[in-house]
Amino acid sequence: MDLIPRRFYLDDVFDDFISTKKEQSMKCDIYEKDGDYHIEMDIPGFKKEEISIEAKDGYLTIKAEKNSEIDEEQEKRNYIRRERVYSKYERSFYLGDLDQDKIDAEFKNGMLKIIVPKKEEIDSKKTIEIR
């Protein structure tokens, strides 16, 4: 099982030069420890209820979405500059064949931690007898 970003390999070469704001908002570290993949992703300013994780067809997708509802207090403000955008952020990683029932996730203090156990690889090699 390889932990590979969804995009093609060559795209990674250009990430530092042309990454989007949405990708910059979901920076992560990925490492292997004790036979598991660990993903640690910064998602500051979000509540646990605003984050979703989906495993499908070998991909692990993390989404964070904040509604742009303006409350009464914000409506009274005279903004000079407003940079905090309420939007949808998404990041996907290709994991290959994975055991969806054993993925564990925790969100605390703006950091999402996901543990993805490696699936035991069964040797599917078969020796063919020559007659």
Image (spheres, rainbow, N blue to C red):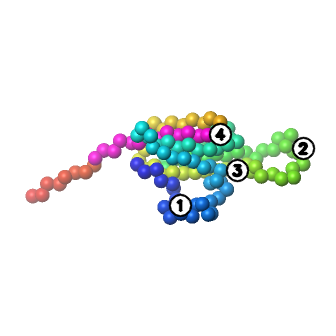
Secondary structure under the numbered disc 1 in the rendered image: helix
**Crowd band around label 3 with a 10 angstrom C-alpha radius: few (<14), some (14–19), many (20+):** few
Q: Mark 2 or 4 closer to N-term?
A: 2
Residue to which mark 2 is pinned: 76
Magenta-colored span? 111-123
As measured in the structure, the alpha-carbon distance from the residue carrying label 1 to the one carrying label 3 is 24 Å
Name the kind of residue labelled 1 in the image: Asp
- The outermost residue toward the left is 131
Q: Position of residue 61 (x, y in %)?
A: 55, 48
Q: Position of residue 109 (x, y in %)?
A: 65, 36
Q: Mark 1 or 4 closer to N-term?
A: 1
Q: Position of residue 54 (x, y in %)?
A: 54, 44
Residue 99 appearing in the image: no
As measured in the structure, the alpha-carbon distance from the residue carrying label 1 to the one carrying label 4 is 25 Å
Name the kind of residue labelled 3 in the image: Ser
**Crowd band around label 1 with a 10 angstrom C-alpha radius: few (<14), some (14–19), many (20+):** few
Q: Mark 3 or 2 closer to N-term?
A: 2
Q: In the depicted view, which residue is nearer to us: 50 or 10?
A: 10
69 horizontally vs 14: left or right = right
Residue to which mark 3 is pinned: 87
Residue to which mark 1 is pinned: 12
The mark closer to the camera, 1 or 3, is 1
Residue at the location (60% across, 36% down)? 107
Residue at the location (28% across, 47% down)? 123
As measured in the structure, the alpha-carbon distance from the residue carrying label 2 to the one carrying label 1 is 43 Å
Residue to which mark 4 is pinned: 110
Name the kind of residue labelled 2 in the image: Lys
18 horizontally vs 75: left or right = left
The mark closer to the camera, 3 or 4, is 4
Secondary structure under the numbered disc 3 in the rendered image: loop
